Image: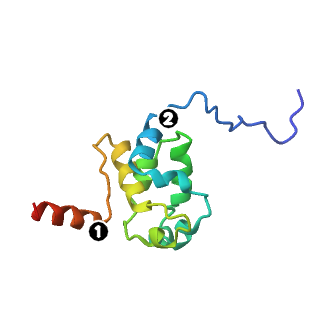
Amino acid sequence: MNKFGFSISQGRQINFDEIKTDKVDKLLELVPSFKLCIGCGGCTAACTAAGFTDYNIRRIHTAFQRGQYTGLEEKLQRCMLCGKCLLVCPRGVNTRSLIVNMRRILSNVEPVTWRPQREIKAESNEESHK
């Protein structure tokens, strides 16, 4: 057989029928704004951690949706949770909650539900007036 100076590599197709979506479903339940992401990359452009490391929240987000969890836990630890991505997101995705809950889901720790401070204050005011 002749060698032509190249080889055919394995395909990179993802069979979505074989992916276990339990982790993605859990994340969607905890952070409903996860569905709103359009992949514009604004979060990655504004990210401080991305300026110093190879951290890319858009790639992490996409890999998580596709069920490609290997190596994500380590990459998620690079996030400083500064919130710049949250400020620039045109769709209002709660990226900070997304990152915290992705970390917890991947490390099998009970996820947390993030609520705006005003909801917590209103709830405590109602309880104090009772």
35 sits left or right of 124 in the view: right
Q: Quadrant of residue 110?
A: top left
Image height check: is 30 above or below 118? above
Residue 118 image label: 1
Q: How crowded is mark 2: few (under 14 residues within 10 Å), some or many (20 or more)?
A: some
Q: Where is residue 90 in the image (x, y as percent from the top left)?
A: 56, 68
- For the point 47% across and 68% down, the residue is 85
Q: Position of residue 94 (x, y in %)?
A: 43, 61
Task: Give the quarter of the figure containing the N terminus.
Answer: top right
Residue sitting nearer the eye, 63 or 4: 63
13 sits left or right of 98 in the view: right
- For the point 61% across and 33% down, the residue is 16
Label 1: element kind: helix
Q: In which quarter of the image is residue 116?
A: bottom left
- For the point 64% across and 36% down, the residue is 14
- For the point 33% across and 43% down, the residue is 107
Q: In which quarter of the image is residue 76?
A: bottom left
Q: Which mark is in front, 2 or 1?
A: 1
Q: Where is residue 125 in the image (x, y as percent from the top left)?
A: 17, 66
Task: Give the quarter of the figure containing the C terminus.
Answer: bottom left
Q: Residues within 10 Å of mark 1 (few under 14, many from 20)?
A: few
Label 2: element kind: loop
Type of the residue with mark 1: Arg
What is the C-alpha distance between the residues marked 2 and 1? 33 Å
Count of labels in the image: 2
Image height check: is 59 above or below 66? below
Q: Provide the residue designation for mark 2.
A: 21
Q: Position of residue 79 (x, y in %)?
A: 40, 63
